[in-house]
Amino acid sequence: MEKIKLGVSACLLGHEVRYDGGHKLNHFIRDTLGQFADFVPVCPESECGLGIPREALRLIGSPENPRLIARQTQKDFTHQMRDWAQKRLNELEREDLCGFIFKKDSPSSGLYRVKVYQDSGQPVKSGTGIFAKAFVQRFPLLPVEEEGRLNDADLRENFIESIFVFKRLRELVQKKKSRGALVEFHTRHKLLVMAHSPEHYRIMGKIVAETSGTLEETYAEYIRTMAEALRLKATPRKHINVLQHIMGYFKKQLSAPEKQEILELLELYRSGHIPLIVPVTLMNHFVRKYEQPYLKDQYYLHPHPVELRLRNHV
């Protein structure tokens, strides 16, 4: 598979574009994820013409519609940033991005809990950076995350799994649309979706089976629902549900000791003593041993490269 194309705040790749001329290199993003991704770096503040180095900025006013203000001179850069953002988003629309990683706390790029200063001078941590907000509004279905939240193992896996799914969705829509192609895509993603949301799993099955609408409408509804499902975190309880579902495919072949081994590993995983990769590896072993073609094609068992070690945490 070709590398995934991701937008990334430029400073996270080591580019010296911050207000003080420095960077915030994130080695996981650049060196580890970079093995599988081509990055499109974006620095809203330097690209919109504020220069390097520059006066530090902050958000002031309403968290829903703040202004971007220079800290010392109080110069207002809100319109300059918004005008530039619309032009940059037009360019990014042509990049076929599969996601974006933003710099946390940034008044231009922070996604969550960005400080917005009130008339009293006190900040409330409930804002979104000017560019980040515009990006999400333009691309509401794309996976997005902040680099700080990627330190959380569950959020990291959820985001990276999502960008790999969106890469495959990009490839799906670039081919000639057909109900057969959509059915095949959905079939291979069934268990992955189930791990995020059994409810969306059922809804998406109905979307694929429905034949009254146009193909364009069906594809659009399917992609929207997939995006909704992927935003819901897969939990140990949901994973165990999927693993038990997989176990059902072998119920006639498994010996009593093999069944017992699976059940013991599921309990150890449920109680937090072993990582998800352990029962999944055993399931992959049984897929090969008992030659289950349906399970062999399930992305749930191989959702992302093993080198990323995303299922190795407890």
Image: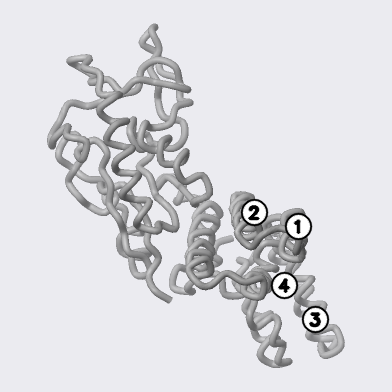
Q: Which residue is mark 4?
A: 265
> Residue sitting at 64 percent across and 58 percent down?
222
Question: CA–CA distance between discs 4 and 2?
Answer: 37 Å
Q: Which residue is mark 3?
A: 249
Residue type pointed to by label 3: Tyr
Above or below, 150 against 255 in this view is above
Labels 3 & 1 near each other (Cβ < 8 A): no
Q: Which residue is mark 2?
A: 221
Question: CA–CA distance between discs 4 and 3?
Answer: 17 Å
Q: Nearer the viewer, residue 139 or 281?
A: 139
Res. 62 in view:
yes
Residue type pointed to by label 1: Pro
Residue type pointed to by label 2: Glu
Q: Is residue 210 left or right of residue 285?
A: right
- x, y percent for residue 192: 65, 66
- In the rendered structure, which disc, 4 or 1, sits on the residue that comes first in sequence? 1
SS type, badge 3: loop
Q: Residues within 10 Å of mark 2 (few under 14, many from 20)?
A: some
Residue type pointed to by label 4: Leu
